[in-house]
Amino acid sequence: MLSVAISAQARRGFPLWRSLDMPPLDYKAEDLYARGRIVDSFCVTGCAVEVALQLSRSLPGGCSALRAEHMPDTVEVGIDGRGQRQVKLHDENKCLAVTVAKHIRVQLHKYDMEMVKAVVDVRDARGRKLGAHDLIAQVVSDEPDRPTGDLSAEVRLRRIRSDAGRRKVREEHRRECCDQCDWWQQELASSEVWAGRLIVLIEFGVNGSSFTSRADLRLRGEEFKGLWGWPGSVGALRVRLRSASSALAPGLPLSLPSARIAHGRVVPPPRSAAKRRAPWALFKKKLTFKHVVRQRVASVASLYSLQGKTHKKLKARIDQGMAAHGWTSSSVFTTPRAGAKKGGAEEWVATEPVLQQMYEES
């Protein structure tokens, strides 16, 4: 376990004795702050996801073999006033980090990508660290219109409380991770291998009992578009096939406003079911919510029947969701059906964040 922590610090060029010779800090035992914000379980888990992604590549059994017991006992966090320190990883941090890392790997594979590296430092000509790729993804599709080159990806974990907050976070990430990211612009200027920039948002609700993921993609010379999870996502990793006369000039910056394909535009994606479907904010008004064990829930079967879809084999679907997204037994569970006699039939119910994820993936 220690070798994981050592290799991560050595790769960052940080003196090992400064953090390894000191006892690890525990965010549950004392108040810790990073960039002015409290270091809590959510913050520490976010740091642990990077380690879990690295392990998912290095373990002999790969991603499927990754378990919480493979995680180190500490993770490196920049603590205000103390510098880089080792912070204790509790069991809940390890389990959630592994679940999130596996989910990211599965989603990448689903959209014809494979993670080839995780947490890769970016340094200038003098060896100074400028930033880091959270992961580098390689396009493995055989389609003729697939992007050429690798994708630099940023992974962000956020708590989302409203639709307005979700839109604000999306805009901030597009600016911070691409348009205003100095090191990313330098990478583009110095190399032609990058196909584009991928931003993966791991979205938690207020209670943190479940999460969903969304991804934004900006291919070289094109505009941002949702790849999965966002309303109107294209759901396919493709670029417009260009003729020689309208080919993108080599080295053209990805995110400057003037970057455009000569005499061309981004091809609108084919109209999909996701585009024809009503936004979640409107659809959820059709559901009947009730409070069960202090949870505001609605029927899972109703979610599917209102869309004209079958609601058979719900148990299998829910088991898959628990494994892939970290749903808990407090966010999706069975309860006596409304109007049923005591001891009668039960139905599956779920909280709004889980229902929204089911809706967007159905």
Image (tube, rainbow, N blue to C red):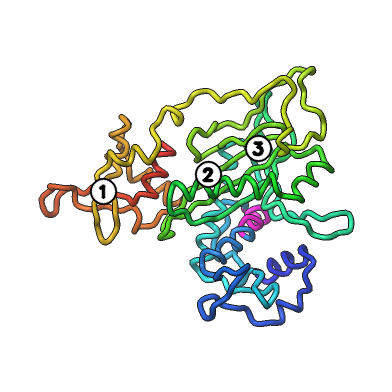
| Residues rendered magenta in the picture | 52-61
User: Few, some or many C-alpha atoms within 10 Å of disc 2 (few <14, some 14-19, many ≥20)?
Assistant: some
Label 3 crowd (10 A; few <14 / some 14-19 / many >=20): many
Which residue, given by chain and number where applicable, does mark 3 sit on? 218
Left or right side of 261 for 282:
left
Q: Check disc 3 and give the amino acid type.
A: Arg
Name which quarter of the figure residue 50 lies in: bottom right
Chief SS of the magenta region = helix
Q: Earlier in the sequence, mark 1 or mark 2?
A: 2
Could you say where residue 337 lies in the image, as x and y percent from the top left?
A: 18, 48
Callout 2 amino acid: Arg
* Residue pointed to by mark 1: 289
| Residue that extends furthest to the front in the rendered view of this protein | 258
Picture residue at 70% right of the left edge, 74% below the top? 83
Height in image: 20 above or below 149? below
Q: Do callouts 1 and 3 mark residues in contact (Cβ within 8 Å)? A: no
Residue 219 shows in the view: yes
Is 52 located above or below residue 219 in the figure? below
Q: Which residue is mark 2?
A: 214
Asked if disc 1 and disc 2 are in contact, CB closer than 8 Å, the reply is no
